[in-house]
Amino acid sequence: MPKKYNIPTKSMPPRFTPVGKSTILDWGGGCLRCFKCVKRRCIYDVYNERTFDTSQLTDTIDNICRSCLRCVQSCPGRVITKIINPEYTAMGDSYWTPDIIASQWKQAETGSIPVSGTGYGGPFTGPGFDDMWTDMSEIIRPTRDGIHGREYINTSVSLGRKLISFRFDDDENPILDRPVNIEIPIPLIFTQLPFGSLSQDVYLAMIKAAKKLNTLITIPSKAWGTYLEPYAESIIPVLSSKSVEDYRHLCKNARIVEIDDTDGFGETLNYIKKEFPDLIVMIKSALDENSSRRIEALANTGAEIIHVYADRNGKGFGERKSWFIKDILREVHTYLVDRGIRDSVTLVASGGIAMAEHVAKTIICGADAVEIDIPILLALECRICLRCENGLSCPVQIENIHPEWGSARIINQMGAWRNQILEILGAMGIREVKRLRGETGRAMFFKDLESETFGKIFNTHG
C-alpha cells in the first residue's frame, strides 16, 4: 500500500469582504418603532455584528446573514426585505457562474467541502459537464470512505511514457530500457493563468502551494527569475522549440519541460533526449478535429506526456469549437485505445475545469490528470471581472497578495477538491484514481440516453 497522503488545511480568511449572494433592504422610513425590534431578536445576532466596509462600500450583513428570513417574516411593518444581490449576479459569466466563484472562495477559506444542507436544487442536465452523471452505486457502503481512513483510496498518478512491452536481445535477455516516470499524489497540476494582475508574489504563492502539495506547476520562461530556483523540481518550464538551447539551465534542473506542438517537434525531442536523457517532455496541443491523429503521431514520435487543452470555457477549436472538452477527450481516448497505444502515453487535459467534480469527469472521459488555472485565481479572491484584460486595476489587488497567504488559500482549495474526489471514488467503489481513467461505463451522458430513448420516436437516432 502506498504511503497515505493528506493535505492539512487551516482557516485563511479573505482580505476583502466577499460579495454576498443576497442582501438585506431595511426601509427605515416605514418603521413602526416596535418596543422590541425583530433585529434585536435575531438568533444569529447579525444586526449587531454588521459593519460597513468603506473601502468597498459593502454592508457585511450580506455575508453573515444565514438567510433564515425570521426578521423578514416577523417585522410588523414589513420594512425588511431580502433580495438577490445584483453585484453577485454580475460576477463571472455564463460558464464561470457566481455560484462557482463563491463556492471556490469558501473552499479556499475553510478547506472544507461545500455542503448545501438541503440537497441539490438545480437542474439535472445542462451544457458541458452538467449533462454527465457519474455512477454512485456504492454510496451505501460506508467502508468505501477514503476521507476518514477506514479504507485507503489512492489519488496518485504517474506522469511519463509507460512501458507496455519488453524487448529482448539475441541471447533472450530483457533489454531494460525503462522510461522515466514521475509520480504525483494528486491528479492536479497548476498551469499558466490566462488573465489576472499577476506579480512575482502571485507566482510564489502558486509555486509554494505546488511544492507543499508535492505536485507541479507550469511556468513560462519569460516569467523565470532567480527567486524560482529553490523550487526548480516543482516547476515545468514552458519553452518554444526555438528557445530550448537558450534555456538549457532550466532543462538541467527541471524534471519535466513543456514544448508547444510544432512541425519540428521531432528534432526538438531528439535534441532534448540527447542532452537531458532523464528529462520528460510534455507537448501542448489544442483539441480540435485533428487531435486524435495528431496525438497518435506525437506518441509514435516519442512524446511522453501530451497536454491537450480547450479554451477557458471548455470548448474546442477549429471544427470542434462547438464541442465540449469531455466529448473531444472521449473521441481521442477511444481512438488511441483502438490503435493499442493509449497506455504508452500520458494525457493531461485543461480548459473549463472549474470544480472538483470536473476533475473526476475529465478523467472518466480519458485523461490521466488535469491542469487547472482559473480556480487558482478564484482562491486568490478573483471575481472574474476581467478588468485586468482591459488594463484596469484589480478590485481585490491580487498582485499585492502575501505569498504565504496565497499559498495557504490554494492548499485549502486543493484539500477540499481532493476530499471531493475521494468521496466520488468511494461512492463508485474505486480505490485508485488511475482506475477511473476512461471508465465511461461508470458514467451516463444525457445526449446518449436521449438518443437511445427517443431517437427512434422522433427520427433523430443515429
Image (cartoon, grey):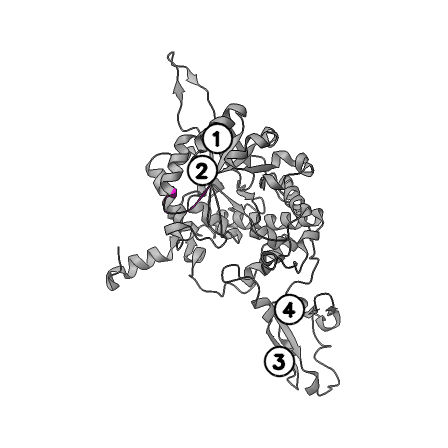
Residue 8 drawn above or below residue 253: below
3D distance between C-alphas at marks 3 and 4: 14 Å
Please provide percent x and percent y for residue 454.
Answer: 28, 62
Q: Secondary structure at mark 3?
A: helix
Numbered label attached to residue 268: 1
Magenta residue span: 285-291
* Element on which disc 1 rests: helix
Q: CB atoms at circles 4 and 1 under 8 Å apart?
A: no
Q: Amino acid at mark 2?
A: Thr
Mark before the other along the chain sequence, 1 or 3 = 3
* Relative side of 403 to 84, left or right: right
Residue at (52%, 54%) from the top-left corner? 354
Q: Earlier in the sequence, mark 3 or mark 4?
A: 4
**Residue picked out by circle 4:** 66
Q: Judge whether residue 215 can be spotted in this image.
A: no
Q: Position of residue 95 (x, y in %)?
A: 49, 59
The reply to whether callout 2 and callout 1 are in contact (CB within 8 Å) is yes
- What's the amino acid at mark 1? Thr
| Residue 262 disc label | 2
Dot placed on the residue nearer the N-terminal end, 4 or 1: 4
Residue kind at label 4, given as amino acid type: Arg
Gap in Å between the C-alphas at discs 2 and 1? Answer: 10 Å
